[in-house]
């Protein structure tokens, strides 16, 4: 094998780094979780999270395998527009800011996004919503688990299954011990690691490889990557925006944060985290454009980011990438595990099995759900069925259908439960059909468009009027 | 040393010399049998996005290079891509409309890529990008929905903030 064909780090070193960080996160999670007394402490961190931690956790959760692995993948596949288009996902955080303020106003003691949908629209809309939420949560969890395995394989040659298992185990363990309090605190540290790491990587890359030579190489051998009218990239642009909006607007990951933040903090925290997040995909995506000049062609497009960084910065770079991506993965995996376990506990266990469950029982069930989700995700990650981007965009067909029902449900009293249910169901079905018939570029776009049309028609013909007081009464 | 002992030592030495004596051909390195390059295929022979994945049927045992040409006979090799480690696939991107030909080759050493030792079968990938007018229509359609959404959120946020 030639020099260009070897891995950036020895397998033993990669394993050692992951083990050290894993032990630190688990011990820290256990330390933070010692004072969790009630289910509110465990699932919503006592509802008193301040601006600094709030912004950091929102940003760190959104910097995930998507940003560190999929942004370079899209830059490698779709060029400039893939990279810039991906950064527009920051709009999801920014546009969620007013919604977060509204959520906090309507249900200051609420628990989950499912709670709101049930109280606002009734059971008929709650069912499609909970199905969409669970499909999305599992899709994202699987993509994160896969990303962990791919990362370790690309950098150290460690078997995909071993790497994926280690990363999943670490995240399940510390979330299990510490709950949302541990998730938010580790997110804060992970944010600092991610920002410093990304800035150092970009600095070294620009210092080592000039923009001119990258441009020349792309112009001669991969001209479409520089084309501002690249058709697939143009089609991807708004689809990606709606996918990002759908992910944030419906997911309990973000609702639980809005509910955990202090009332005066929610709006500012989401705006700030969106602005901080915006340049990160540009930096992580840009490094992929240097790949052809460096003679790096990845086995799978989602491996390109770590491979280029490791090549340019050598062993130091590989260690840096390993730490950054591991932090990014952990910060999202823990949040998603915590939020999904909470959703299952509150919306399924509390609603159908034990409505009178005590705090102690709820914490116990929440932990059981967390461990179960970890095992389920591990099983689904075993066969590496698709690339990360393909897997994520599959869920886009579902989540984009929730955008208009949620926005109008939070503000417009005339949107009925039947209309919301119809909008989510039809949007998801037509989005899925578009995904399979046309491609992932149109799945979220068509899903959102269909859902919007149904909501608008429903509002025009509605004689239903919702009393906001109903949510407040139930909440208190 | 007695005569008997000297005799025995001579016999042992003669036997040892005989034992190690081999024909000249035995001193040459045995001819290395090169592992064959696995058959090459593409996961998607028709691409609408300009990117595609080349695939080897088995894990490669050799240091390989992918040759790219725009004609099936490879009279001019337009570009070469090193195959990464022992993975079975390689992803390429940024290609324009047209027919693109690929083969995997083993070359003697880096820098001596004119004469390959062995080459694989040739794979043809056809790139036909989506129509630009279709892409622009979808872009405008998406922009229109996005403007509606942002307008709705801003309108209600301002209205309720004033009321509250």
Image (tube, rainbow, N blue to C red):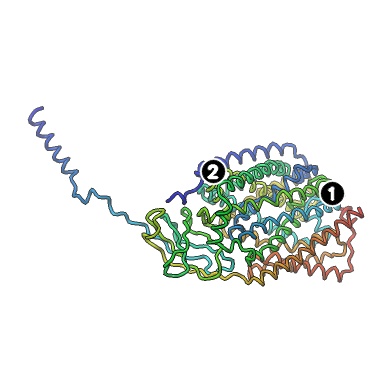
**In this rendering, does residue A303 appear at all?**
no
Q: Is residue A17 left or right of residue A62?
A: left
Residue A3 spot, x, y in % from top left: 45, 49
The chain carrying label 2 is A
Crowd class of label 2 (few under 14; some 14 to 19; many from 20; radius 10 Å): many
Q: Which residue is mark 1?
A: A108
* Residue at image point 90% right, 55% down: A469
Of labels 2 and 1, earlier in sequence is 2
Q: Nearer the viewer, residue B53 or B143?
A: B143
Residue A346 spot, x, y in % from top left: 76, 52
Residue A317 spot, x, y in % from top left: 56, 44
Q: Which residue is mark 2?
A: A14
The chain carrying label 1 is A
Q: Nearer the viewer, residue A7 or A180?
A: A7
* Residue at image point 71% right, 68% down: A446
**In this rendering, does residue A256 appear at all?**
yes
Crowd class of label 1 (few under 14; some 14 to 19; many from 20; radius 10 Å): some
Q: Nearer the viewer, residue B135 or A130?
A: B135
Q: Are marks 2 and 1 on the same chain?
A: yes
Instruction: Give the numbered dot on residue A438.
Output: none
Label 2 element class? helix
* Above or below: residue B88 compared with residue A108: below
């Amino acid at each position: 094998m030639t020099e260009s064909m070897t891995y950036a780090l020895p397998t033993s070193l990669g394993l050692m780094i992951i083990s050290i960080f894993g032990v630190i996160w688990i011990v820290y999670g256990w330390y933070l979780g010692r004072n969790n007394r009630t289910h509110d402490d465990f699932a919503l961190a006592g509802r008193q999270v301040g601006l600094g931690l709030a912004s950091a956790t929102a940003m760190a959760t959104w910097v995930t395998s998507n940003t560190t692995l999929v942004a370079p993948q899209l830059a490698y596949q779709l060029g400039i527009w893939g990279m810039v288009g991906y950064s527009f996902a920051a709009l999801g955080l920014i546009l969620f800011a007013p919604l977060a303020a509204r959520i906090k106003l309507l249900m200051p003691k609420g628990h989950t996004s499912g709670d709101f949908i049930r109280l606002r629209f009734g059971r008929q809309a709650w069912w499609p919503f909970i199905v969409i939420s669970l499909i999305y949560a599992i899709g994202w969890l699987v993509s994160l688990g896969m990303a962990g395995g791919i990362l370790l394989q690309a950098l150290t040659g460690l078997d995909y299954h071993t790497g994926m298992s280690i990363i999943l185990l670490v995240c399940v363990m510390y979330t299990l011990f510490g709950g949302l309090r541990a998730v938010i605190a580790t997110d804060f540290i992970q944010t600092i690691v991610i920002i410093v790491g990304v800035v150092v990587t970009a600095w070294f890359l620009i210092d080592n490889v000039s923009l001119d030579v990258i441009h020349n190489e792309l112009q001669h051998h991969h001209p479409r990557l520089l084309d501002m009218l690249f058709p697939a990239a143009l089609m991807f642009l708004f689809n990606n925006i709606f996918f990002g909006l759908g992910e944030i607007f419906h997911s309990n990951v973000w609702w639980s944060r809005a509910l955990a933040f202090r009332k005066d903090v929610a709006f500012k925290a989401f705006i700030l985290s969106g602005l901080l997040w915006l340049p990160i995909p540009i930096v992580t995506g840009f490094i992929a454009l240097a790949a052809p000049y460096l003679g790096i062609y990845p086995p799978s497009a989602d491996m390109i980011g770590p491979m280029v960084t490791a090549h340019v910065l050598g062993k130091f770079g590989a260690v840096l990438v390993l730490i950054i991506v591991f932090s990014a993965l952990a910060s999202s995996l823990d949040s998603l595990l915590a939020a999904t376990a909470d959703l299952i506990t509150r919306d399924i266990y509390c609603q159908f099995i034990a409505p009178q469950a005590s705090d102690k029982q709820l914490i116990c069930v929440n932990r059981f759900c967390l461990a179960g989700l970890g095992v389920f995700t591990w099983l689904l990650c075993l066969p590496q069925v698709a690339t990360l981007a393909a897997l994520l965009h599959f869920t886009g067909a579902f989540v984009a259908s929730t955008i208009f029902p949620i926005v109008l449900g939070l503000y417009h009293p005339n949107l009925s439960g039947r209309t919301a249910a119809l909008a989510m169901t039809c949007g998801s079905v037509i989005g899925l059909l578009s995904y399979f018939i046309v491609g992932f570029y149109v799945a979220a776009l068509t899903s959102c468009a269909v859902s919007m049309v149904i909501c608008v028609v429903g509002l025009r013909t509605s004689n239903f009027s919702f009393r906001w007081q109903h949510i407040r009464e139930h909440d208190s | 040393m007695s005569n008997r002992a000297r005799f025995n030592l001579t016999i042992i030495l003669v036997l040892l010399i005989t034992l190690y004596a081999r024909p000249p051909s035995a001193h040459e390195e045995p001819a290395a049998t090169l592992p064959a390059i696995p058959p090459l295929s593409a996961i998607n022979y028709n691409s609408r996005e300009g990117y595609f994945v080349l695939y080897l049927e088995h894990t490669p045992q050799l240091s390989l290079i992918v040759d790219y040409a725009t004609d099936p006979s490879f009279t001019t090799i337009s570009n070469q891509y090193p195959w990464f480690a022992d993975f079975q696939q390689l992803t390429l991107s940024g290609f324009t409309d047209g027919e693109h030909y690929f083969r995997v080759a083993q070359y003697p050493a880096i820098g001596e890529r004119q004469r390959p030792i062995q080459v694989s079968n040739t794979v043809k990938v056809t790139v036909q990008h989506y129509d630009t007018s279709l892409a622009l229509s979808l872009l405008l359609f998406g922009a229109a929905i996005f403007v509606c959404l942002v307008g709705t959120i801003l309108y209600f946020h301002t209205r309720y903030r004033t009321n509250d």
